[in-house]
Image (cartoon, rainbow, N blue to C red):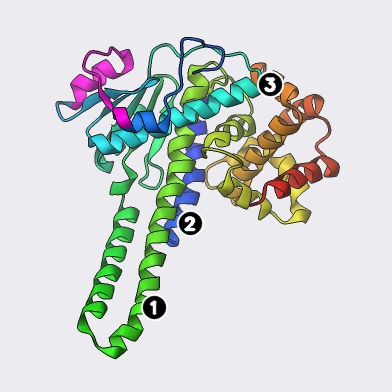
Amino acid sequence: MNSPARERRVVIRARFACVAGAVAQLFPLVGMAQSRDVSAGESNRRGPIASSQVASAPLDALSAALGGSFRRYHSEHFEILSDCDGGTIRRVLELAEDTFRGVSRFIKRLELPHRPPVGRMPMLVFERYNSYERHARQAGFPASESVPGYFDETSGICALFNFANSTAIRTQRDELWRRERALTSLQRTGDKSDAAAATPAQNDVKAARRALDAAQQAVIATVVRHEIAHQVLAATGVQSTHSGAARWLIEGTAMQFENADGPNALRLADALAVPPGDRLAHARRVVGDPRELAPGRPNASAAYAMAWALVYHLAETQPRALASYLSTPPTGANELDAFERRFGELDTAFVQKVYSNLEATRP
């Protein structure tokens, strides 16, 4: 029997597999005076810091087990054990610190009770999928190339795999290389007919580059930042994945930090794609029935988008009520009833306000 936390991770796997698969087809903690933000510029200057002298209990045993190819690095709030190159580690640490800052701003805005993380938050980053898959399965989590990460609250570790080495990304890189070679060949001949064909070939190269970038950015948002957000929310005591809180609330909160600033463009697009006549029933199902976010559920992307939209709307319009709900989530109660007791009836007028707010943020 899987634990509730394990079942929740399976749900997330299904959602992100849906997103990544679709793309592939296209192809200072607030209140802590002693903590300071690390800007992206400063992070770039410093780079990842080798952490041979830094103790992190969750990573100690793993460091010995994984062998000498894995080194330890750290930033201000995170420590990584990885066999990736320094450039990859620097980018992961920048994403992690940026996500930490996003959670910190959220905590400050909602005046949420929180605590400082106990030491640096531990991360595992694997260069190759087979190593990541083996570790994930040993830890009891499903593994997929299209879902290159998970957060295990029991150990406190966020584990990731370098998605740049996935089959989907390698295929798209090969396609980009093929189109670039074809364009170079046309440009070298000097033949007029080849020169005329060069413009469409240039457009093909640009399209391949856009598809590759879109695939990588979607995974960075919906998997990497999302899992780090779960880690930071748990480490700061804001939201535990073991708390029994509603699934829409747990996932909807983490999705607030999938992008650096402003509304989440990926989730916004999915939410706006829900037909107007279906939105009320859909919102009530997402809140009242956790199976809406279950593995293999039809329209999983719309369900996750609705969870994001509800938390986004509540943070904007009822921040105190949302803060109270996050701090003391109801357990053992009908979730739809609990939602309506705290935020008001989830009726047509409520959903219209949610979507009016979303429409106002449309780019």
Question: Disc 3 residue type?
Answer: Ala
Eyeballing the image, is 55 above or below 260? Answer: above
Look at the image and say whether residue 47 sits in the magenta stretch. yes
Q: Is residue 117 visible?
A: yes
Q: Look at mark 2 in the image and give the residue it sits on.
A: 22
Q: Where's residue 6, x and y in %? A: 47, 29
Eyeballing the image, is 346 above or below 169? Answer: above
Question: Disc 2 residue type?
Answer: Ala
At horizontal 39% and vertical 66% (from top left) the residue drawn is: 206
Look at the image and say whether residue 170 sits in the magenta stretch. no
Q: Is residue 25 left or right of residue 105?
A: left
Q: Where's residue 62, x and y in %? A: 25, 21
Q: Look at mark 3 in the image and give the residue it sits on.
A: 323
Q: Circle 2 sits in a helix, a strand or a loop, which is it?
A: helix
The one of 271 and 79 positioned closer to us in this rendering: 79
Inter-mark Cα distance, 3 to 2: 34 Å
Q: Which region is colored magenta?
A: 45-66
The one of 148 and 88 positioned closer to us in this rendering: 88
Q: Is residue 151 left or right of residue 103?
A: left
Which of label 1 and label 2 is nearer to you? 1
Residue 16, numbered label:
none
Query: How busy is the neighbourhood of tag 3: few (under 14 within 10 Å), some, or many (20 plus)?
Result: many
Inter-mark Cα distance, 3 to 1: 53 Å
Q: Look at mark 1 in the image and give the residue it sits on.
A: 200
At horizontal 71% and vertical 33% (from top left) the residue drawn is: 316
Which of label 3 and label 2 is nearer to you? 3
Eyeballing the image, is 127 above or below 337? Answer: below
Q: Where's residue 360, x and y in %? A: 72, 47
Q: Circle 3 sits in a helix, a strand or a loop, which is it?
A: helix
Inter-mark Cα distance, 1 to 2: 25 Å
Query: How busy is the neighbourhood of tag 2: few (under 14 within 10 Å), some, or many (20 plus)?
Result: few
At horizontal 60% and vertical 31% (from top left) the residue drawn is: 253
